[in-house]
Image (cartoon, rainbow, N blue to C red):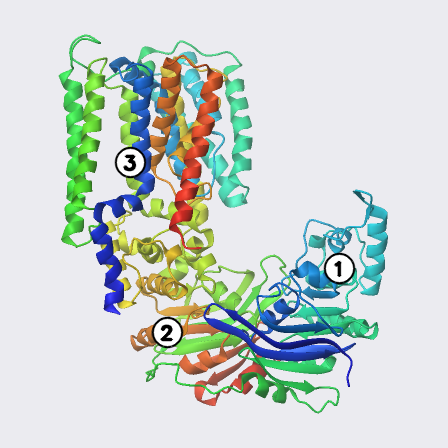
Amino acid sequence: MNDHILEMRSITKTFPGVKALSDVTIQVERGEVHAICGENGAGKSTLMKVLSGVYPHGDYEGQIILEGEEVTFGSIRDSEKAGVVIIHQELALSPYLSIAENIFLGNERKSGLLIDWNATNVQAAELLRRVGLRENPATKIMDIGVGKQQLVEIAKAMSKDVKLLILDEPTAALNDEDSAHLLDLIRGLRDQGVTCIIISHKLNEIRAIANHVTVIRDGQVIETLDLQSGEVSEDRIIKGMVGRELTNRYPERESHIGAEVLRIENWTVHHPQQHDRVVVDHANVVVRAGEVVGIAGLMGAGRTELAMSVFGHSYGSNISGQLYLDGNPIEAKSTGAAIRHGIAYATEDRKKYGLNLIEDIKRNISLAGLPKLAPNGWVDGNRETVVANDYRRSMRIKAPSVAVKTGTLSGGNQQKVVLSKWMFTEPEVLILDEPTRGIDVGAKFEIYGIINQLVDAGKAVIVISSELPELLGICDRIYTLAEGRITGDFPVADATPETLIRYMTLEKD
Amino acid sequence: MSTETTAPIKKAREKGIVSYLMSQLRTVGLLVAFLVLLALMQFLTDGSLLTPQNITSVLNGNSYILILAIGMVMVIIAGHIDLSVGSVVALIGAVTGVITVTWGLPWWVAVIGGLFIGCVVGAWQGIWVAYVGIPAFIVTLGGMLTFRGLAQITLGNIPITPFPDSYVAIGAGFLPRMGERGVGVDPITMAIGAIVAAVLVVLEVRERMGRQKLGLEQEPQAWFIVRAAVTAAFILLVAWQLSQYAGIPIIVVVLGVLVAIYTTVMNRSVFGRSVYARGGNLTAAKLSGINTKKIDFLLFVNNGFIGAIAGIAFTARSNSAGPNAGNMFELDAIAACFIGGAAVTGGVGTVIGAMLGGLIMATLNFGMYLMGLGSDVQQFIKGLVLLAAVAFDVFNKSRGVRN
């Protein structure tokens, strides 16, 4: 009988309309590093939110047994009191406060009513020593890099007497050196008796550090593999992650591929604030008329960054490389210029970046193509309404009129408004970033149909998606992107989920 | 499928005028609030509020705030604020004072000079807001102090007065009328009122016919007729009252022209649309190809220009350019915008709404003054009215939008 620090039994968690977790059972041994992997949206983060009390007891079905006793966390505070600490992918540090203040935020060292600054700084220095971070505890968070910030998060976790540390994609934003240091630290923590659960896409890291790996797919546990023998290969893990049948969820299309429309050559983009960090690294992408090209990559691989930098330099700094449209070099340094050249980009987050939610359907559809409705600077309001009504009908946007505010529409209908807006600009190339995220199955099918209509009309379409089955279902060709580099270019006939994931996780030499 | 999409339309038709008015609650509510307030004040002042002389006085005495509110509402729609306009009024007053009184140049040189300085002042603030990226609150708070200081330096802290009559006429003059002031009904004023009312109604009818031809009309006919009739009647009533005193103040003509121009700009021009888009969702606007920095810059240039117009009007009316002129005007203009339905978060508001908001404040001011209430009570009540108006908007919004 193994000594389990944690058992989650038959966890089921449903959101309206979706079963995010279905009868999930996992066991974590005391003092091990336990990896959890699965595709984006498989349910990993949901499971960790259940464990850490983000979704309180009663919000899910099943039992959590921590150190042999059932626990019922009502909030993160409860789980932290029990020694379960989660470090999220987006770090939760306050940039203007010092390292020491961040470590003890919400858990301040006090004498009486006042903060005991000596105790704060002395204890912070001790924690920093334990995580191997050589910084003054009084340094502000904004003045240290992401790698060091990650270490501060771990120091903060350790200040809470952590027994079970959960790390969500801890190395996603780190460079190789920082990643290696962090993995060493996790090993060190394990030797000090801290059990770690690590969620990661990086399979080589998982193999290097984890004792067991649990594979989750579609909200269910597929298997738990023992990595200690070293016999389990990355391919074996990948098979577990993707082994699902592709059913007929994609409309049929016959490809008629024509001449090259957009060529992205030697495209290099740096982070907008950290100017020395390369986000897109000498990428080369070609898309032809009548072609749907997919870009597959993990979170943080630089997919959105590639697309937005191509779309009028709307992301990044020090952008170098050349764009060619129909074989001619073009300059598109503003979104307006990109639109005039016939490039359109529908964002990943339509509520935050794609729509003006307090404005109506009509004015959202016309916004990017407004110059077309206003040849002399004055908008023809009646034609605008006619155009919007045409799209409402042809795209089947479910709304009583085009005067309805887009904030009141469902996700699928909002996405159709976004697509209408870009179709009205009559682009040659459409870049669609996660076009079906958060949309129900029926609306997804309709959106695939719209994409098919676009390429049938001779347009070129680039689709960025986290869902491999979707890319395999609708694309003619798929590029894989890893750490900002294009690592592969596969005709869809040659692409399998296994090969894609292999190239999506390809590390730099 | 088809029954599902047509059902809501049918239902909306059945509910007809009531549901249409509910969907226009903000605009209709503002208009009704204004009319109720007028009636209430007329009653409380025993009928002395709406006399010809008082109406003239209210319009004349608040026109510069209303002018400021036109530019201010555009800035607020874009999601900014401008605290400097009161000081701009003082600075432009000082500049025109130096040009006309000290240098003895004609009034039109002063007007051109004042408008030019206004644009320069606006461009200065626009650069900091749009291209350097400093929040407008800070930039214009700085401007409020800087321009006040500049005005005082220009004046050497001594008011310039009196101005030449030709300049004073801009703020205190009237269009010509027949006969003596306060005697009988002036046919010229009535004719102008009738022409303005007719033009407005004809334009509205033409627009409605255009929409009907394309099958786009949503507004019920009964409501359209009521709206057109009320608009026309309102203009004719104001003209009727003005014609019994001194005729139409020149500054009201300026205000009317500005309202017409800027309403069109905000509704019909690409620039106006870009301002709404910028205030509604900055990133979405940028990603839709809008040069939001240019929009921000132009908005502040425009607000400097409008501040200059208000400055010229105020200086002319008071026949003096003083170091403390225009103090707190920015707050009156901002209050007018928010009472008129603009949102602090940007993206929402109209020029007409801001005008109604300004008129509500003006009516409250003058009515309470006629009732003999002290400025202490006046401020107390105006503060509550501002709060109530914005609370109504918040309530209205939470009612409309899904989660």
Residue at the image position 78 percent from the left and 73 percent from the top:
A184
Q: Which residue is mark 1?
A: A156
Q: Which residue is mark 2?
A: A442
Q: Quadrant of residue A447?
A: bottom left
Residue at the image position 26 percent from the left and 25 percent from the top:
B253
Q: Is residue A322 above or below residue B264?
A: below
Does any portion of residue B365 appear in the rendered image? yes
Mark 2: secondary structure: helix
Asked whether disc 3 touches disc 2, contact meaning CB atoms under 8 Å apart, the reply is: no
Asked whether disc 2 touches disc 1, contact meaning CB atoms under 8 Å apart, the reply is: no
Does any portion of residue B75 appear in the rendered image? no
Outermost residue, bottom side: A231
Instruction: Give the alpha-carbon distance from disc 3 to disc 2, as whole Å.
Output: 47 Å
Residue closer to the observer: A380 or B120: A380
Residue closer to the observer: A110 or B238: A110
Q: Are marks 3 and 2 on the same chain?
A: no
Residue at the image position 20 percent from the left and 23 percent from the top:
B237
Residue closer to the observer: A307 or A367: A367
Which image quarter is the C terminus of chain A in? bottom right
Please provide percent x and percent y for residue B211. 18, 50
Q: Which residue is mark 3?
A: B261
Q: Which marked residue is nearer to the observer: mark 2 or mark 1?
A: 2
Residue type, mark 1 in image: Lys
Q: Which chain does the residue under circle 3 lie in?
A: B
Q: Is B357 left, or right, of A394 in this rendering?
A: right
Residue type, mark 2 in image: Gly
Q: Is A116 left, or right, of B349 in this rendering?
A: right
